[in-house]
Amino acid sequence: MIGTRRHRLAVALAMTVAAAACAPAGGPGAGVSLPNVKRAQFGALALAASSRVAAGTEQPILDFTVEGTPPSVFVNYIVPDANAAAFATLVNLPPGFTLAKLRILESDPVPSYWLSLNVYRVSGLTNGLRAEWSTYVDDGSGTPRFMIIRARASEGSLDPIGPLAGAEPFVHSVTGDVITTDMNK
């Protein structure tokens, strides 16, 4: 078996070209042409990648672009130490997770517990406006991690904490130098 990825791709391309050359005339995708070879090759690569994703040997590559307009807004609220236990219960941390204190900015005087709200426009895997409430946790590794608590989407979409987020329209726009965000909830 050929061992390197480059060799496997070269063999796959050669097989695709040979298959395209042998395609019957007159049918869809018939004949050797660059578009047909590209379509067949990229289809074969996508099929192979999907098999590796299904087997757990490769992570999926998903197009998710945060758009520049309107600008993203990130609002951070300190969770006072006295309220941290109640907050951890409220956000339903998974077993083995604890809230993590950190500095959002280097200039923050002390590490704190945080509730963050991020509002932005996205395209790719999902489209439209998104709002995510999150906090920071330690999963036992000692490295603070970002955990989404609740998400909203102006269009129905995949949800980072459940299978789907239904459409919950809201406003996030910019006029001149004023950003307006209104969620009505």
Image: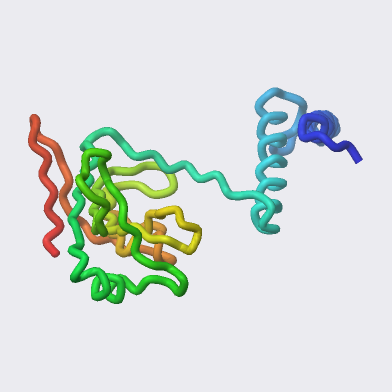
Where is the N terminus found, in terms of image quarters? top right
Looking at the image, which residue sits at the far right? 1
Instruction: Give the quarter of the image for residue 123.
Output: top left
Instruction: Give the quarter of the image for residue 121.
Output: top left
Residue 103 x/y as whole percent:
28, 47
In the rendered structure, the answer to whether residue 63 lies left or right of residue 169 reads: right
- Where 156 sits versus 110, above or below? below
Residue nearest the observer in this picture, 37 or 83: 83
Residue nearest the observer in this picture, 20 or 26: 20
- Where 63 sits versus 156, above or below? above
Where is the C terminus found, in terms of image quarters? bottom left
Residue 53 x/y as whole percent:
65, 53
Residue 148 x/y as whole percent:
35, 59
Looking at the image, which residue sits at the far top? 34
Identified at 75% across, 33% down, the residue is: 30
Identified at 27% across, 46% down, the residue is: 104
Residue nearest the observer in this picture, 136 or 12: 136
Identified at 30% across, 63% down, the residue is: 150
Residue 131 x/y as whole percent:
26, 54
Identified at 44% across, 66% down, the residue is: 163
- Where 166 sits versus 146, above or below? below
In the rendered structure, the answer to whether residue 22 lies left or right of residue 172 reads: right
